[in-house]
Image (cartoon, rainbow, N blue to C red):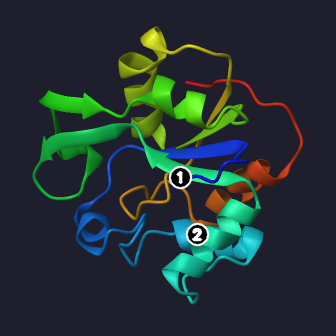
């Protein structure tokens, strides 16, 4: 999901089963992505999905995933099988959305997949930052800590790529 004037891209690794079945980003109820977007942009899970997307678009935020297709049992990133994994076309995406200069990764797996599978062939210059995963499988940080980290997408501070 991206609007023509998007300036920020939030990348996940690959949608989970609930998201694929619902054809919605972050559809699993225990994933805190939409709760965080609610606290930051009033695009919370209580709104219809289309309204949430419109709010993100009005804030020049695009959503996408590093992986277009893969084999995986269940929804966990750790279950993604490397053989047969297909990346999304980022060079084409960034040509279509040339105003995007900041890329935020929703978790370490998205960042690692991007770094190893996309970055070597990527054209253009971007700023990158890895944020704590909103997945319930990432229990190392509580909601307050995740929200505090995600607040950076609302700031005008320059960001650096972090491992």
Picture coordinates of residue 108, whole percent (x, y): 46, 37
Specify whether residue 144 is in view. no
Please tell me which residue lies in front, 18 or 108.
Answer: 18
Q: Which residue is nearer to you in this view: 103 or 1?
A: 1
Q: Residues within 10 Å of mark 1 (few under 14, many from 20)?
A: some
Under tag 1, what secondary structure?
strand
Q: Is residue 158 left or right of residue 31?
A: right
Q: Residues within 10 Å of mark 2 (few under 14, many from 20)?
A: many
Q: Position of residue 62 (x, y in %)?
A: 60, 51
Q: As drawn, is 150 to the left or to the right of 73?
A: right
At x 75% / y 68%, what residue is drawn? Answer: 40
The disc at residue 53 is 2
Identify the residue under disc 1: 63
Question: Which residue: 89% across, 42% down?
Answer: 156
Per the image, label 2 sits on a secondary structure element best described as helix
Image height of 135 relative to 123, above or below? below
Q: Is residue 114 above or below residue 8?
A: above
Tally the numbered discs. 2
| Residue 152 falls left or right of residue 35 | right
The percent coordinates of residue 70 (x first, y second) are 18, 40
Q: Residue at x 56, y 13 (%)?
A: 123
- Label drawn at residue 27: none
Across and down, in percent, residue 142 comes to: 57, 64
Residue 88 picture quarter: top left
Against 28, is 115 above or below?
above
Q: Do the residues bearing badges 1 and 2 touch, measured as CB atoms within 8 Å? A: yes
Looking at marks 1 and 2 on the same chain, the residue that comes earlier in the sequence is marked by 2
């Amino acid at each position: 999901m991206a609007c023509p004037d998007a300036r920020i891209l939030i990348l996940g690794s690959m949608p989970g089963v609930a998201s694929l079945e619902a054809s919605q980003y972050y559809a699993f109820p225990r994933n805190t992505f939409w709760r965080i977007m609610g606290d930051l942009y009033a695009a919370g899970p209580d709104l219809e999905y289309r309204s949430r997307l419109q709010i993100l678009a009005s804030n020049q935020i695009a959503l996408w995933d590093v992986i277009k297709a893969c084999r995986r049992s269940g929804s966990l990133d750790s279950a993604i099988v490397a053989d047969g994994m297909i990346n999304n076309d980022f060079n084409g995406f960034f040509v279509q959305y040339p105003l995007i200069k900041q890329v935020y990764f929703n978790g370490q797996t998205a960042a690692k997949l991007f770094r190893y599978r996309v970055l070597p062939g990527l054209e253009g210059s971007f700023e990158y930052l890895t944020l704590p995963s909103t997945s319930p499988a990432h229990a190392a940080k509580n909601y307050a800590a995740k929200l505090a980290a995600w607040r950076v997408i609302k700031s005008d501070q320059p960001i650096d790529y972090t491992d």
